[in-house]
């Protein structure tokens, strides 16, 4: 039975394969040498660590819990703070690092990265979705194994490799610029209804997949988005809410898909209502005008008080 590889051996092996390395700095030490620094550097540069030459993309951690105290080696040896898109101490590799890589996901194989920004021409995007505009922002979210795309109009949508195509992405973006509609669905599955639902939406290809029914969704138009709004339950009940929105011209198709999905089960669906981004902008402008009027009134009151 082979002994567990030392941190140095594992790092050397990853370097030979062209992979980024994860180094727990306080634990890095070799016989006859001092251990690594105990605290993160304050000058933004990789500290002197015996037996370690930093490479672009290497992850250095000074923490013992997740990656809250981790840094990524950037260009010219600069240390980039883990941006942690999760806000919970998980590792994020930003575009500042991956812009220098053509196959970033492979570079971090074996390292627990939750979020990773990708170039538009990264090999993963090319192989799964084709050529996409450079102006868009691409982030891989490993928690759900999905690609998050933020578009120039500020909207973000997720797409799944093997399920969505380049055409789906372009169509969604085009639809996001049209008049929008939104509605919600509330469902409540209890007793035998819950068992029927679980049976209907089980994973027929993998009987060990016990939670397929929780991931099941209506086949709404690809231009539409379905977001959870909360829920709960137990062994004999499951209830929840979903919010759906997309182009108004396909609202009837979206409602029909939801009704078909929950047919025979307790649920309520609200009537779609229309809105546009301009409406949101108008609301923001109105709020700003109201704030300005309140400030003017306060200034006037103060001036009158002084005159008295």
Image (cartoon, rainbow, N blue to C red):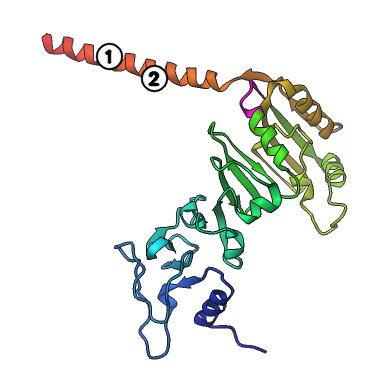
Pick the quarter of the image with the C terminus.
top left
Image quadrant where one finds the N terminus: bottom right
In the rendered view, would you say 130 is above or below 110? above
Q: Is residue 180 above or below residue 213?
A: above
Of 267 and 201, the residue lying toward us: 201
Q: Is residue 256 left or right of residue 10?
A: right
Residue 225 in view (yes/no): no
At label 2, counting other C-alpha atoms closer than 10 Å, the crowd grade (few under 14, some 14-19, many 20 or more) is: few
What is the quadrant of residue 227 in the picture?
Answer: top right
Where residue 216 sits, quadrant-wise, is top right
Is-magenta flag for residue 8?
no
Q: Which residue is mark 2?
A: 288
Is 221 situated above or below 112? above
In reply to whether residue 178 is colored magenta, the answer given is yes
Residue drawn at the location 79% of the way across and 46% of the way down: 213
Q: Residues within 10 Å of mark 1 (few under 14, many from 20)?
A: few
The secondary structure type at the circle numbered 2 is helix
What residue is at 53 percent from the left and 79 percent from the top? 12
Q: Element type at marker 1? A: helix
Whole-percent x, y for residue 76 in the image: 38, 64
Q: Position of residue 215 (x, y in %)?
A: 74, 46
Tag 1 residue = 296
Q: Residue at 71% of width from left, 22% of height from top?
A: 270
Which residue is nearer to you in this view: 132 or 255? 132
The part of the chain drawn in magenta is: 175-182
Q: Give x and y (percent) for residue 183.
A: 68, 25
């Amino acid at each position: 039975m082979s002994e567990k590889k030392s941190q140095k051996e594992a790092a050397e092996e990853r370097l030979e394969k062209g992979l980024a390395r994860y180094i727990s700095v306080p634990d890095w030490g070799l016989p006859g040498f001092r251990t690594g620094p105990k605290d993160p550097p304050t000058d933004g540069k990789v500290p002197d660590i015996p037996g370690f030459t930093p490479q672009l993309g290497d992850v250095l951690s000074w923490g013992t819990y997740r990656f809250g105290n981790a840094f990524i080696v950037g260009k010219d040896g600069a240390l980039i703070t883990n941006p942690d898109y999760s806000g919970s101490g998980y590792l994020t590799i930003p575009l500042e690092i991956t812009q220098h890589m053509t196959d970033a996901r492979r570079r971090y194989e074996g390292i627990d990265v939750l979020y990773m920004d990708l170039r538009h021409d990264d090999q993963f995007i090319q192989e799964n979705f084709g050529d996409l505009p450079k102006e868009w922002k691409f982030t891989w979210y490993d928690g759900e194994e999905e690609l998050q795309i933020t578009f120039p109009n500020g909207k973000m949508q997720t797409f799944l490799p093997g399920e969505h195509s380049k055409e789906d992405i372009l169509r969604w973006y085009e639809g996001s610029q049209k008049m929008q509609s939104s509605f919600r669905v509330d469902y409540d599955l209890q007793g035998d209804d819950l068992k029927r639902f679980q049976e209907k939406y089980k994973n027929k290809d993998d009987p060990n997949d016990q939670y397929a029914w929780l991931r099941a969704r209506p086949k709404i138009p690809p231009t539409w988005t379905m977001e959870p709004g909360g829920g709960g339950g137990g062994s004999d009940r499951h209830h929840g809410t979903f919010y759906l929105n997309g182009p108004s011209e396909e609202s009837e198709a979206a409602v029909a898909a939801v009704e078909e999905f929950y047919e025979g089960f307790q649920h309520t669906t609200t009537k779609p209502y229309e809105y546009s981004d301009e409406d949101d902008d108008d609301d923001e402008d109105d709020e700003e005008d109201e704030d300005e009027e309140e400030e003017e009134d306060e200034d006037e009151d103060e001036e009158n008080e002084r005159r008295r």
